[in-house]
Image (cartoon, helix red, strand yellow):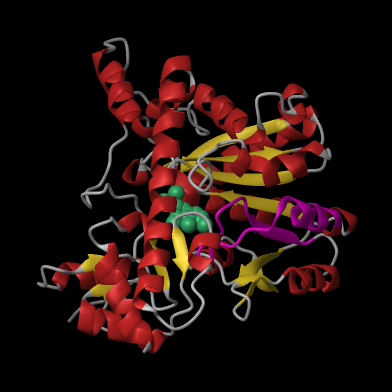
């Protein structure tokens, strides 16, 4: 008899479970468009050249050791990460009112941010968009916040429900936390325009709300690190406070290394110093301190002019390949005369296309065409290649006709 006899089998994670099902499929034409990881034209995982180069430098540096890092990680990594998202000439950095903690990728940064807010912020409610990345609700509610939603995506236009979003924010209580995807909204690929961001900023600031940016795709959406940081910088330039969770999973291809950062942009240096001390109290009993390797890679790349330059080139190449896949898929559907308007495939940005396919259509495509994707109809464009686009187009065509 087991102490755990009562346990029920838990369902697979809705996103990671797609890969489990894919791995079981024996078909030679099977296609995994579920998980958000970049693949080359050959369908292979990609380790960036600058990452390899940084690793070689790290390994050959015999002065390095395996001692524990400080609770908030590598100080230079933290400084460089904050500079990357907030900008070279950020007033907040200049005024030393930012504190940053190296955390376990984007997810860990969000979770530490949630626990910090649950402990220290007056409002315990966070508003997140509908829909959003599947893990957000769980991360924030288990982190101690109450989760509510604001309207974001309009299935009719397959675009932003801007009015609905503003209405929901206007009618939310003053001071609540608002989660915003910094760019390349997941799963919809729909971002506000710069003008719309300004409207969102005005509502959030006028209601004294606290913006919490999730930046998982900087550089991956447009190919430019600066363009993709626009929204965050807009909110920082007005002098107000915010939180930013950064992930280096996608833009440096460091998925399994779990490298990320949580930054608190505070109103003054003195608040930032105290916030930093409190962040340590949140992190210490959670995992004590973060791992060395991945953050050392990032610090090496960000801190070296040549490597940084090469990184921007590799990053743009990844972003461009994804954008090319959008055009190929769009053209392939047009060539087949597939019913419906598929322009959203080329309008949406980032790693994913929110196809608008129903759960039944997704099931059909998996069953008949061995195409794997999340049941909300989200496909990872990064998992496509020019060789596999025709197969996907055939599957979509068959599903909708
Ligand atoms: N936030 C969003 C919107 C994401 O799409 C992801 C990854 O898919 C993450 C955060 C966190 O990723 P990671 O923890 O691997 O950095």
Q: Position of residue 135 (x, y in %)?
A: 48, 65
Q: Position of residue 306 (x, y in %)?
A: 43, 16
Residue displayed at 28% across by 37% down: 47
Q: Position of residue 221 (x, y in %)?
A: 51, 48
Residue displayed at 41% across by 72% down: 334
Q: Depth check: give the residue in front, 288 or 101.
A: 101
Q: Quadrant of the N terminus?
A: bottom left
Q: Position of residue 304 (x, y in %)?
A: 45, 16
The quarter holding residue 172 reads bottom right
Q: Depth check: give the residue in front, 212 or 33.
A: 33
- Left or right of 293, for residue 277: right
Query: Does the rendering let one see residue 11?
Result: no
Q: Is residue 77 magenta?
A: no
- Left or right of 304, for residue 9: left
Query: Where does the magenta region start and end?
Result: 176-202
Furthest residue in direction right, as rendered: 206
Q: Is residue 199 magenta?
A: yes
Please determine whether, in this image, residue 67 is positioned above or below residue 223: above
Residue displayed at 61% across by 28% down: 83
Residue displayed at 32% across by 45% down: 256
């Amino acid at each position: 008899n087991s102490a755990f006899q009562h346990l029920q089998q838990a369902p697979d994670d809705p996103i990671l479970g797609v890969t489990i099902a894919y791995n079981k499929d024996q078909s030679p034409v099977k296609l995994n468009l579920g998980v958000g990881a970049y693949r080359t034209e050959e369908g292979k995982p990609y380790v960036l050249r600058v990452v390899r180069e940084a690793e070689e430098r790290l390994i050959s540096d015999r002065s390095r050791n395996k001692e524990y890092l400080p609770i908030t990680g590598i100080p230079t990594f933290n400084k460089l990460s904050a500079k990357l998202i907030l900008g070279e000439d950020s007033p907040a950095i200049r005024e030393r009112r930012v504190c940053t903690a190296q955390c376990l990728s984007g997810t860990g940064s969000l979770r530490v941010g949630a626990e910090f807010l649950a402990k220290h912020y007056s409002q315990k409610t966070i508003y997140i968009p509908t829909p959003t990345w599947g893990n957000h609700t769980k991360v924030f509610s288990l982190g101690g916040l109450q989760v509510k939603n604001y309207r974001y995506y309009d299935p009719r236009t397959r675009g932003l429900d801007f009015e609905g979003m503003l209405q929901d924010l206007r009618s939310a209580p003053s001071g609540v936390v608002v989660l915003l995807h910094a760019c390349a909204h997941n799963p919809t690929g729909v971002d506000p325009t710069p003008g719309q961001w300004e409207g969102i900023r005005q509502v959030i600031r006028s209601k004294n709300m606290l913006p919490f940016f999730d930046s998982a795709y900087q550089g991956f959406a447009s190919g430019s690190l600066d363009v993709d940081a626009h929204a965050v910088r807009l909110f920082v330039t007005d002098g107000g406070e915010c939180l930013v969770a950064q992930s280096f999973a996608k833009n440096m291809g460091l998925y399994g290394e779990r490298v990320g950062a949580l930054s608190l942009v505070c109103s003054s240096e003195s608040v930032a110093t105290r916030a930093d001390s409190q962040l340590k109290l949140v992190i210490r009993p959670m995992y004590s301190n973060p791992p060395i390797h991945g953050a050392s890679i990032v610090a090496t790349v960000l801190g070296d002019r040549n490597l940084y330059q090469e990184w921007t080139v590799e990053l743009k190449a990844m972003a461009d390949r994804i954008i090319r896949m959008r055009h190929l898929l769009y053209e392939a559907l047009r060539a087949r005369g597939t019913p419906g308007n598929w322009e959203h495939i080329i309008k949406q940005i980032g790693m994913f296309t929110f196809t608008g396919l129903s759960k039944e259509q997704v099931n059909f495509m998996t069953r008949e065409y061995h195409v794997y994707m999340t049941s909300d109809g989200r496909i990872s464009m990064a998992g496509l290649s020019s060789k596999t686009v025709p197969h996907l187009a055939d599957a979509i065509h068959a599903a909708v006709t």
